[in-house]
Image (cartoon, rainbow, N blue to C red):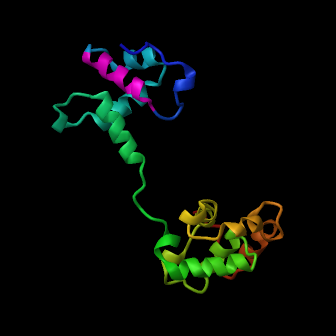
Amino acid sequence: MPPERLPETERSGRSLSLPERQRIATLRERGLSVRAIAARLGRAPSTISRELRRNTLARDGGVYDGDLAHARAHQRLRRPKTGRLLRDAHLRAEVQAKLELEWSPERIAAHLRRPWPDRPEWHLCHETIYQALYQGGKGGLSRTLTKNCAPDAPCASDAARHISALPGSSPRRC
């Protein structure tokens, strides 16, 4: 039987571990309430309730299985979608060209909206560009250009001025 409470080194504040899910299954099988299970695991009742709601399916006979729940949780973590910069070679080339001119990702994101207002798939968030840069080869952009995106680099320090100088630009978030 798993321990009543896992050591803090094995626990994540955000997601349940496999032993925690197995313990939930054992305690649920014994008929304990959501609040009682939460108290024993040192988790919020809402965390236990959400876990049971997500992973107790009718096709499983309405029974919570910790191992199956853990596998489902890992399946949901995967992001099957490929990034926009990987899918669109022309967009990637445009962003790469602007990075080579030492434009910041913020400035590039704002720029892409102006010449192509009718192509919303080209309207990137600057975070998308940063992610593509820092993922290296997987992101599709040259990693050698990340030096231009450092906070103390000239291109990043005046990004706000470039964005606000664009006609029709608005302070939209991602």
Would you place residue 97 above or below residue 9 in this image?
Answer: below
Q: Quadrant of the N terminus?
A: top left
Determine the image quadrant of residue 97.
bottom right
Instruction: State yes or no: residue 28 in magenta.
Output: yes
Asked whether residue 39 is in view, the answer is: yes
Where is residue 170 shown, x and y percent of the image? Answer: 64, 72
Instruction: State yes or no: residue 22 in magenta.
Output: yes
Would you place residue 151 above or below residue 113 in this image?
Answer: above
Q: In this rendering, would 46 be left or right of 129?
A: left
Q: Which stretch is magenta?
A: 16-29
Asked whether residue 169 is in view, the answer is: no
Q: Residue at x 55, y 74 (%)?
A: 123
Q: Which residue is drawn at 32% across and 16% down?
A: 27
Determine the image quadrant of residue 67.
top left
Would you place residue 133 above or below residue 63 in this image?
Answer: below
Where is residue 47 shown, x and y percent of the image? Answer: 43, 30
Where is residue 51 shown, x and y percent of the image? Answer: 36, 32
Q: Residue at x 69, y 75 (%)?
A: 99
Q: Which residue is drawn at 78% across and 72% down?
A: 161
- Of residue 114 and residue 124, the one placed in the foreground of this image is 124
Q: In which quarter of the image is the C terminus?
A: bottom right
Would you place residue 15 above or below residue 159 in this image?
Answer: above
Where is residue 62 shown, x and y percent of the image? Answer: 19, 30
Q: In this rendering, would 155 be left or right of 173?
A: right
Main SS of the magenta part reads helix
